[in-house]
Image (cartoon, helix red, strand yellow):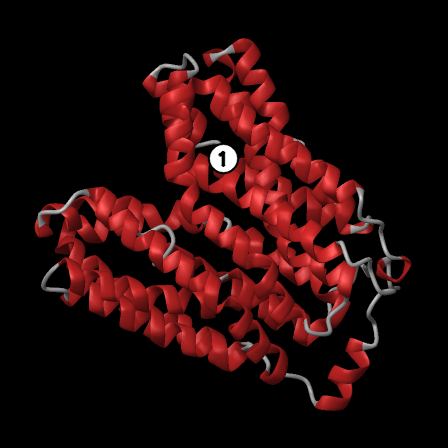
Amino acid sequence: MSEASPAGAKRVVIALGTAQTLAWASSYYLPAILAAPMAAEFGVSTAWIFGAFSAALMLSALLGPLVGRAIDQRGGRGMLTASNLVLALGLVALGLAQGPWGMAAGWVVLGIGMAMGLYDAAFATLAGLYGLAARGPITGITLIAGFASTVGWPVSALMEEAFGWRGACLGWAALHLLVGLPLNRLLVPPAPPPERKAAMTQQAPPAPSRLAMPLLAFVFAGSWFIAGAMAAHLPALLQAAGATGATAVAAAALIGPAQVAARVAEFGLLRRFHPLVSARLAMLGHPLGAAVLLIFGGPAAAAYAVLHGMGNGVMTIAKGTLPLAVFGPGGYGARQGLLGAPARFLQAASPFLFGLLLERGGVAAALSVTMALALSGCLALLLLRPAPAAAPEG
């Protein structure tokens, strides 16, 4: 990977990173703040709200390959622009819902929008624009959008307090139309002309083994299961391990900064190596942190959060850069959709499954499962060999 960014990439990274922050904050991170008031108004449990959200994630997984294929063929600007309209429509549907099933319909529309407008679509757009040189821009947008929860949760809470949960949904919809849509439409370049796109496709590394796709799918599914489980249960896990409530919350707050710090390290120090190196190191973060937590208990809560957060931060980048380095830019979008589908399904199921493990087996049993998944993922990555053509391009 050349140290220099592709021409014009900085503007695109800032635009996409900002638009991605908005997209994640108003969809994936929405239920954490609004599920309780939604459930209270409609007279259902919060589990019902999260069930509708999980269904939206599963729909997003099913649509991923179709969206990726469309981006491969026509570029990502139109898809990302349309995603702002669809996400806004879903948020309006939520804000105007008159009952639980109307709310569920809003989540269905949001699921379609998430397939069209979250990381996989943005990564495919960058791969189509820059070919193998997209690694730096992919890292760049994850650096910015890594603050989506940091921004999204307080903004959702402020809007909910001022205008109610319906007003918060409508406020996010307005931001998509006033901020996200112009960013994606005006600052993301159109797809390159066919002759340039064909030349970039020829950058592909030597053909990988037939095991590359299933191995990567397994790695991403395992890492996304762990990420989803920790996002839902981290404070409860740390308290079950012996931390006080205040310590658990403070430690959980370290996840975001740890993710961003690791992404900065990937951007500055690790980018000279093949993405496999970064991914292998990242998959060790969770099991190392879990081992420390199991040995030392509550006092190690912060150490666990930092190690887990660093690994998870780099794996988000690897989700975009590994397929690019292993397979090349040709057919990247459709391949991302296929690789991401199992990960999204497991991510949707992970809060329930990990919660069941934690309740029935305790901290040791729950963490043993996630440690095994992470270590198996690291082993799978060791079976993949770096392709010579994916080495630095300069």
Q: Position of residue 221 (x, y in %)?
A: 57, 47
Examine the rendered structure and indicate whether residue 305 appears above or below residue 205.
Answer: above
From the viewer's side, name the closer residue of 345 and 99.
345
Examine the rendered structure and indicate whether residue 294 appears above or below residue 233.
Answer: above
Would you say 295 lies left or right of 161 here? right
Q: In which quarter of the image is the N terminus?
A: bottom right
How many numbered marks does the figure carry? 1
Q: Three-letter amino acid code at disc 1?
A: Ile
Q: Quadrant of the C terminus?
A: bottom right
Q: Where is residue 368 in the image (x, y as percent from the top left)?
A: 55, 24
Residue 145 seen anywhere in this rendered image of the structure: yes
Q: Where is residue 197 in the image (x, y as percent from the top left)?
A: 74, 83
From the viewer's side, name the closer residue of 41 and 58.
58
Which residue corresponds to the image point at 67% horizontal and 69% vertical from the top-left? 332
Residue 191, image quadrant: bottom right
Local secondary structure at mark 1: helix
Q: Position of residue 137 (x, y in %)?
A: 65, 62
Assess disc 1: are there few (<14), some (14-19) or many (≥20) residues with their C-alpha within 10 Å of its C-alpha.
many
Residue 190 seen anywhere in this rendered image of the structure: no
Which residue corresponds to the image point at 49% horizontal and 35% vertical from the top-left? 255
Which residue corresponds to the image point at 38% horizontal and 49% vertical from the top-left? 151
Examine the rendered structure and indicate whether residue 176 appears above or below residue 295.
Answer: below
Would you say 21 lies left or right of 262 here? left
In the picture of the structure, the residue carrying the numbered disc 1 is 255
Residue 140, image quadrant: bottom right
From the viewer's side, name the closer residue of 153 and 238.
238
